[in-house]
Amino acid sequence: MADNITIKFFERITDEKMKDEIWKILCECDKEFYPPLSERKVYNNSLLKINCRAKIADKRPYAYFKSMIKQNFLAAFIDDRYMAGFMAFLSNVTPKEFNVKCNYYTTLCVRKANRQKGIATKLLTFRLPEELRLEITITRTWSLNYPIIKALGGAGFTIKKVSSNDRDKGVDTLYYQRKILKLIK
């Protein structure tokens, strides 16, 4: 059964109910990230190796959420009312790994009950508002994150850079890029 999935863009999340839903989804996905989001201080933490992880008593991703919620968001809704997932991103930034202005997708989470419905691919391929469209979009993941690697390939992303053993021994960080050709009008 195919659900009625819609993607909506938000420049900032200001609605407290939406923030609460994003928090719940983030907590549900926390331990699936490598390293877990609850062990990171900020969304763009470049120190991802196990020995660099933050030591946090309450193992929920408070610091990560506080940093991430300031970004732009795409939210996936089922039947226009139930948030099934989200993707946070930065627009018009120049990551240190690439000397180019781009959109940088930082966090993608889908509720476990709503996976295998194409939501991640819909988020990754959503057409941003004209003022946010850039030629290049970049994201990163870890080498053992097979579901997202598959979704990235299906959304037109290709590997641009690999940082070997960046997250742990045998766990690389994969940087993906997608170029959008500008059509002449």
Image (cartoon, helix red, strand yellow):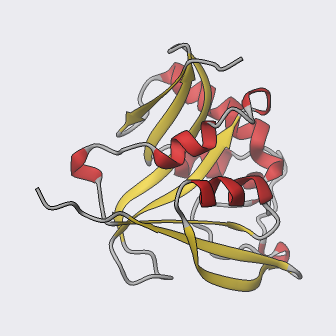
Above or below residue 162? Residue 71 is above
Q: Is residue 52 left or right of residue 92?
A: right
Q: How many marks?
A: 0
Foreground pick, 46 / 182 = 182
In the picture, measured across the screen, residue 149 lies left or right of residue 19, that is right
Please say whether residue 8 is visible from this viewpoint: yes
Please give the name of the residue rendered at 28% of the width and 52% of the height, measured from the top-left corner. 132
Rendering coords of residue 10 (x, y %):
38, 35
In this view of the protein, which residue sits in the foreground, 58 or 143? 143
Q: Is residue 162 above or below residue 54?
A: below
Does residue 42 appear in this view? no
Quadrant of res 139: bottom right
- Foreground pick, 140 / 25: 140
Q: Residue 164, relative to residue 52: is it above or below?
A: below
Residue 179 image point, x, y percent: 40, 68
Measuring from the top left, give residue 35's x and y in whole percent: 79, 63
Of the 4 image quadrants, the one containing the C terminus is bottom left
Tell me which corner region of the image, top left, top right, bottom left or bottom right, holds residue 165. Answer: bottom right
- Left or right: 24 in relation to 108: right
